[in-house]
Amino acid sequence: MTRVVVTGVGGYSPVGNDWPEIESNLRSLRNGVRYMKEWEVYDGLNTRLGAPVVGFGNPPSFIR
């Protein structure tokens, strides 16, 4: 048997930027995929769907 110890949880993702938000969205079966209107300027793309990480440009001070 393999054992795993989780010492902390955090992340930046399309479904949230802290564990309570991520967990809530996952349990509610929400995803971070959306139509990317700003991609309409690019010719030849096969999709306009993306999963942006909102707020990634402003990480908390303890990450810097």
Image: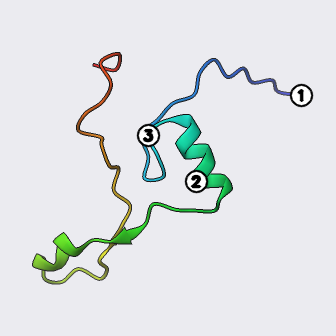
Q: Which residue is mark 1?
A: 1
The residue sitting at the right extreme is 1
For the C terminus, the quadrant is top left
Q: Residue 34 falls in which quadrant of the image?
A: bottom left
Q: Residue drawn at (38%, 61%), measured in percent from left and top?
A: 51
Estimate the x, y position of residue 29 in percent, counting from the top left.
63, 62
Q: Amino acid at mark 2?
A: Asn
The amino acid type found where label 3 is placed reads Asn
In the depicted structure, whether residue 25 falls above or below residue 11: below
Q: What's the residue at 30%, 40% (across, down)? A: 56
Q: Earlier in the sequence, mark 2 or mark 1?
A: 1
Circle 3 Cα neighbour tier, 10 Å, few/some/many (<14 / 14–19 / ≥20): some
Residue 13 in percent (x, y) is at 44, 46
Q: Which residue is mark 2?
A: 25
Q: Residues within 10 Å of mark 1 (few under 14, many from 20)?
A: few
**For residue 31, above or below residue 25:** below
Q: Please, is residue 15 above or below residue 44 in the view?
A: above
Say which residue appears at 62% left-offset and 53% top-offset.
26
Query: Tag 2, which secondary structure?
Result: helix
Relative side of 19 to 60, left or right: right
Q: Disc 2 to disc 1, how far (Cα)?
A: 31 Å
The first of marks 3 and 2 along the sequence is: 3
Q: Is residue 39 left or right of residue 4?
A: left
- Quarter of the image for the N terminus: give it: top right
Q: Which mark is residue 17?
A: 3
User: Residue 2, image x and y in percent?
Assistant: 82, 27
Determine whether 4 is above or below 58 in the image.
above
Q: How many marks?
A: 3
Residue 10 disc label: none
Q: Residue at 34% x, 20% y: name it.
A: 63
